[in-house]
Image (cartoon, rainbow, N blue to C red):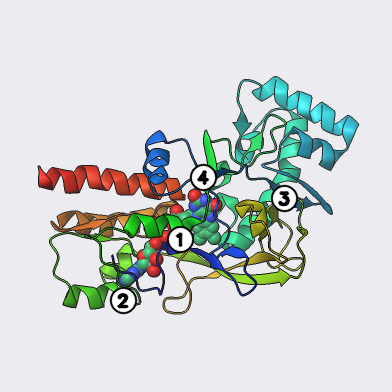
Amino acid sequence: MVDQRSHIGGNAYDCHDDNGVLVHKYGGHIFHTNSQRVAEYLSRFTCWTPYQHKVKALVNDQLVPLPINYNSIEMIFGKPDGQQMVQALEDEFGEYSSVPILKMRQSSSSQIRRVADVMYEKVFLHYNLKQWGLTPEQLDASVSARVPVRLSRDDRFFQDSFQNMPEDGYTAMFKRMLNDPLITVELDTSYRDAVESIRFKRLVFTGPIDEYFDYKYGQLPYRSLRFQFETKPQEKLVQHVAQENYPTPANEHPFTRSMEFRHITNQQGVNFTTLSLEYPEAYVVGQNQPYYPVPRDENRELFRKYQADAMKLKSVFFAGRLADYSYYNMDQAVARALSCFDKQIVAVAA
Ligand SMILES: Cc1cc2nc3c(=O)[nH]c(=O)nc-3n(C[C@H](O)[C@H](O)[C@H](O)COP(=O)(O)OP(=O)(O)OC[C@H]3O[C@@H](n4cnc5c(N)ncnc54)[C@H](O)[C@@H]3O)c2cc1C
């Protein structure tokens, strides 16, 4: 296993900072999945601590539950109006558990459209502008569908059947995964250096697919982030919940979210707490990291050209968030790796 970084674990890497707080170097990572196979596979390498993620968003100077749910609507609009809106939503969409904001905007009910318009402006628009540098309409519907309005009072961010954090962190879990006499780890080594010096029969490439092909069809757009870590000399946690989102305009808050790690890790016995603020920025090759593939049709078309070339290679397989140019969560990345193993490696061995 070769990585150009000086550590294992990819973006899920965690480590202790100078004050002994377990932090996620690339932003807070919360593990959740509905896949029994993924949960069982990872459980070979870690025990788990139960954790239900909660997020609050700053709307009209108050922190309201996210995804927006009935509680948030009543907080934003006040009780009489908010209750009527909740009723209108219940009447129109009651059979669903959640509705994307863009669908609510097309409703024939003026009350629902009002909720949607306020949510659009206060929760989605500026967040998207900051996160992607684009409006929600310029992105795939899948992006806004990730943060729908939830038709209940369930304040948990995720509803997956398996929501747990690795008991002693992600890096510890990956270390156990790599602890095998057949696995050699080479860090600070780029793929290009490795192919020169390492003999291989099959290669799984997890970097950006356009980089692999020397950008021959042009660069696939990515979005990047800058993390600002702040440590406070106190045992008491600063935020009420692990994650606070700032869907406010960039001139009010240039960052999108603030994550307090000890909420997530449940780390005990430290007299410090560390938070990270996330500042989205454009991705520039060689200057920062390609964190998010930008989910738009034109980008996917460009990706397909690279994918067609990738399919022609017999001994190189592309898998992962950057290689598949797909907005994967960790469990999806693991599922992709397992299916790659099933299809390619097992098939070849058979
Ligand atoms: C800010 C942020 C928050 C996230 N939060 C969550 C969350 O809460 N829950 C969740 O499930 N998922 C979350 N994710 C997604 C999660 O990080 C990814 O699903 C996961 O890391 C994907 O794993 P991967 O192996 O595909 O890619 P990566 O983790 O990106 O690993 C790819 C590795 O390949 C290496 N590499 C790339 N190019 C080369 C090269 N040319 N030579 C050598 N090495 C190379 C990179 O250095 C990197 O270590 C988050 C992502 C980000 C950016």
Q: Amino acid at mark 2?
A: Thr
> Could you tell me how far apart the alpha carbons at marks 2 and 4 are, in whole angstroms?
31 Å
Q: Which residue appears farthest toward the left when viewing the image?
A: 350
Q: Nearer the viewer, mark 2 or mark 4?
A: 4
In the image, which disc is placed on residue 171? Answer: 1
In the image, which disc is placed on residue 48? Answer: 4
Displayed quadrant of residue 37 = top left
Q: Which residue position is annotated with label 2?
A: 189
Rendered location of residue 42, percent (x, y) = 40, 46
| Front-lying residue, 307 or 233 | 233
> Could you tell me how far apart the alpha carbons at marks 3 and 4 are, in whole angstroms?
20 Å
Rendered location of residue 274, percent (x, y) = 68, 66
Vertically, is 79 above or below 269?
above
Q: Give me the residue at 31% from left, 66% from top.
A: 210
Quadrant (top left/top right/bottom left/bottom right) for the C terminus: top left
Asked if the residue at label 2 sits under 8 Å from ligand 1, the reply is yes
Asked if the residue at label 1 sits under 8 Å from ligand 1, the reply is no
Left or right of 261? Residue 287 is left
